[in-house]
């Protein structure tokens, strides 16, 4: 066998090992749609807050409760879309949607996300609204970085960007809303588009 044959065999073995240890069927299109959902939700919330609360959120007010429901709807819609498109991609590639690699991915993703979500609820209950955008970005970024070990490694770069945006939001809480829009809206669309053309379109 020539050196090229050996290199080809080594490459195939490496790919098989990578597939067995990582869940690589994440859909770039789901990231694009999640970003669109976030932008739509942010636009509705911005209109509500500036029309009925004059730019301020009141914990006991209907505007605040509606804003939280919109945030929850965006999250749920993004999750449902992600599961649907990822499942479809996994079936197309002949891969299992629920195996050890996907379990590890989900477990490592959810730990920072759940802890961050609970912490944000505590902060909101204390009326410290300005800190929530930064915290959401930071914990989401940590969840992506943590999960990247068991999925497409490129998602860690999105995680790093989210963390940086979260830290900026912590320094400038007055810009928290716009940084949230940039992180969960624009960056999802940009990253999802890049991932779609890099992996999904092959």
Image (spheres, rainbow, N blue to C red):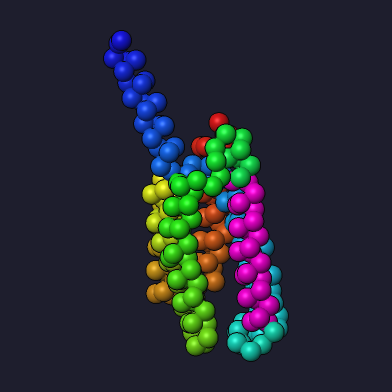
Can residue 98 be seen in the rendering of this structure? Answer: yes
Residue that protrudes farthest toward the top in the picture: 1
Q: In this view, does 146 lie above or below 178?
A: above
Residue at 44% across, 52% down = 104
Residue sitting nearer the eye, 119 or 165: 119
Number of numbered labels in the structure image: 0
Residue at 57% across, 51% down = 31
Q: Tell me the quarter of the image containing the C terminus.
A: top right
Residue that protrudes farthest toward the left in the picture: 3
Residue 9 is drawn in which quadrant? Answer: top left
Q: What stretch is highlighted in magenta?
A: 63-86
Residue 80 in the image: x percent, y percent?
A: 64, 56
Q: Is the magenta stretch mostly helix, strand or loop?
A: helix
Q: Is residue 202 above or below residue 104?
A: above
Query: Does 201 lie within the magenta span?
Result: no
Query: Does 71 lie within the magenta span?
Result: yes
Residue 62 in the image: x percent, y percent?
A: 69, 84
Residue sitting nearer the eye, 88 or 58: 88
Residue that protrudes farthest toward the front in the picture: 99
Residue 46 is drawn in which quadrant? Answer: bottom right
Can residue 141 be seen in the rendering of this structure? Answer: no
Q: Is residue 145 left or right of residue 67?
A: left
Residue sitting nearer the eye, 29 or 178: 29
Residue at 44% across, 64% down = 111
Q: In this view, does 89 lie to the left or right of 130?
A: right
């Amino acid at each position: 066998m020539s050196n090229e044959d050996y290199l080809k065999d080594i490459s195939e073995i490496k790919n098989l090992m990578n597939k067995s240890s990582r869940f690589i069927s994440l859909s770039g299109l789901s990231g694009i749609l999640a970003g669109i959902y976030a932008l739509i939700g942010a636009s509705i919330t911005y209109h509500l807050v500036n029309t009925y609360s004059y730019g301020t959120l009141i914990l006991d007010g209907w505007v605040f409760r509606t804003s939280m429901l919109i945030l929850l709807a965006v999250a749920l819609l993004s999750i449902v879309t992600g599961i649907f498109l990822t499942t479809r991609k996994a079936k197309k590639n002949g891969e299992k949607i629920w195996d050890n690699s996907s379990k590890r991915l989900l477990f490592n993703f959810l730990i920072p996300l759940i802890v961050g979500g609970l912490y944000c609820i505590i902060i909101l209950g204390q009326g410290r609204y300005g800190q929530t955008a930064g915290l959401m970005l930071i914990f989401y970024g940590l969840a992506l970085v943590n999960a990247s070990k068991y999925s497409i490694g490129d998602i860690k770069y999105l995680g790093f960007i989210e963390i940086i945006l979260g830290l900026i939001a912590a320094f400038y809480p007055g810009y928290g809303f716009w940084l949230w829009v940039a992180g969960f809206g624009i960056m999802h669309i940009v990253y999802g588009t890049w991932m779609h053309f890099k992996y999904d379109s092959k």
